[in-house]
Image (cartoon, grey):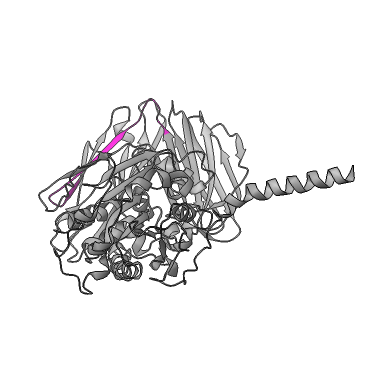
Amino acid sequence: MNIKRTLLGLSFTMILGLTALPQQAWMAPINPVVAPSPGAWATGQTPANVSPNKPAILFVHGLTSKANVWYEDNDMYEYAYKNGYETAFINMYDITGTPEDMWKDGELLATKIQEISKYFGKKLVIVAHSKGGVDTQSALVRYNAYPYVSRVITLSTPHHGSQLADLAYSSWAGWLADLVGSQSPGTSSLQTSYMDYFRSEMAKDPDVNKVPFYTMSGNKWSGSGKASYTFGGSYLSLFGSNDGVVTTESALLPGATLIQSGAWNHKTVRTGSFTFDLFKSYLGTVPAAVASLHAPSTVTKDTYNVDSDIQDTPASVNYMAQSSPSTNTNSATSEEGHGQYYIRGGQHSGTANEILTVENNVNQISLDWISDQPLTHLELISPSGKVQKVKLQSTPDDEFFHGAYHQLVTLPQPEAGEWKVQATSATKGAYLMTAVYTPGAEQAELKTNLSNNQLRMNVNTEGLDQQRTHLNYTVNYYHPDGSKLAPPTERSNRSMATSESVTTPVTNTPSIYVVTTDIDGYTEAGYPYRRTLVKSVYVDEQGNTYSN
């Protein structure tokens, strides 16, 4: 009996061993170690099934991120390795804690692209997440790195900016954003108006189409379990489908090929098990005979045409919409502000109090109290005096308000009237309260139009008591790097007319100014009504205005 058991045990062990052998051939690769400095890069482990005709993949991270985002809590590197691709990973200026704009990042990246291409002896395919795609285009087009790259795949890149970056520079968010350090050159450069300027700069460069771009984007932010995506997704839903950080519309690049927009959030879109197999067939092949190792050390424009090096491109949807920047003072742009969000913020000494107004027929309010530290207490008092104490769950933000904390509250079928919101922290600090309204029966609409240095604000007053409603606006001025500029902030509080106009300032220097507009009044039925609109405008050295 013991002999039989022994034989059975040996047989079972041998079967397990034979079963395990194929798995051992696909063990996860060893993670690279990238030095914590801007421009530092490291290669991944060389796959056993590597092919000389496969391009090496350079992975470029996004805003406030770093190289290890591709292989820690992410299987993207493992998927590339298993499919026989050599890989490289790089740290941008974000590793210092101060993200830089696409020009400084692009200049750094261009140098490193050449180094990495020469190391592998062939051209690269760049897979870039979020702002990394903007930095990549800057490197290829402005800083002439295109001969070393055969194609680029961008994953939820804000090619037209993000309204969350605009929000970070609004008058209500300024205190908090400044305190947690999110008003960086990198964040500032992603404001929608500055990205409109960037798009115009790319469009007029003769090298803009030397390297083909392919895009992917996410459209599912709910259920992600991340407070920053819940907040961002709810806010951005006013502007369209999004992944919690970037709208699907912004992720479309003029002249690029759209691979797919799928049910991913801003994290899963860069996760190998979610998207690698979908973009794998777009990586192409690079014949060794045209490897960019042989390119001159000093790049001369128009020397190379990489289109002839690209093979095996599958059929896909081509997004060929051309950019239409407002590149002179006589051109006009318009934007609809749906009037469905309300923002307040500032400093506090330990306790902050705000009033949240609710008109009749509002279906739901998604409230997010964002602070520089976790709250110790959050309480809401309804118009009828009912106290609602919120069970706190403070979650850190790792996106545009990196360093801040979210406290989320949902108010289904909220009672109409004025709600009191009180938040308490252990020490003094700063906060931002955002409330996103699911539309009710009476919703004002605010539209803006920019032309001839005049920002015109047209308000649909239907359903509002015009005599008791006011239009309030604040204009904050910034250098493109995010630092504040003179003249000082302008404020106005006046009775609302059908149309208001603000003259855009001339500061004799490139500048971004952010107009924060509040509607404060009552509906015709007598209910309080308050909404907010944030508008970003960039003015270049020639006085041309840009606004998306």
**Position of residue 113 in the picture relative to residue 5 (left or right):** left
Q: Position of residue 182 (x, y in %)?
A: 42, 60
Count numbered badges in the picture. Answer: 0
Residue at image position (16%, 47%) is: 324
At x 38% / y 41%, what residue is drawn? 242
Given residues 29 and 252, the one toward you in this image is 29
- 411 vs 457, left or right, is right
Q: Which residue is outermost to the right?
A: 1
Q: Is residue 441 magenta?
A: yes
* x, y percent for residue 334: 21, 42
- Residue at the limit of the structure toward the left, as seen here: 330
Q: Quadrant of residue 522?
A: top left
**Position of 305 relative to 441 (above/below):** below
Q: Nearer the viewer, residue 283 or 449?
A: 283
Residue 270 x %, y %: 43, 50
Residue 15 position, x and y percent, is: 69, 45
Is 54 a magenta residue? Answer: no
Q: Which residues are magenta?
A: 438-455
Q: Nearer the viewer, residue 315 or 343?
A: 315
Q: Is residue 534 visible?
A: no
Residue 509 in sight here: yes
Please state, as top left, top right, bottom left or bottom right, where the N terminus lies in the image. top right
Tell whether 359 sits left or right of 152: right
Residue 98 falls in image quadrant: bottom left
| Near-viewer residue (258 or 339) | 258
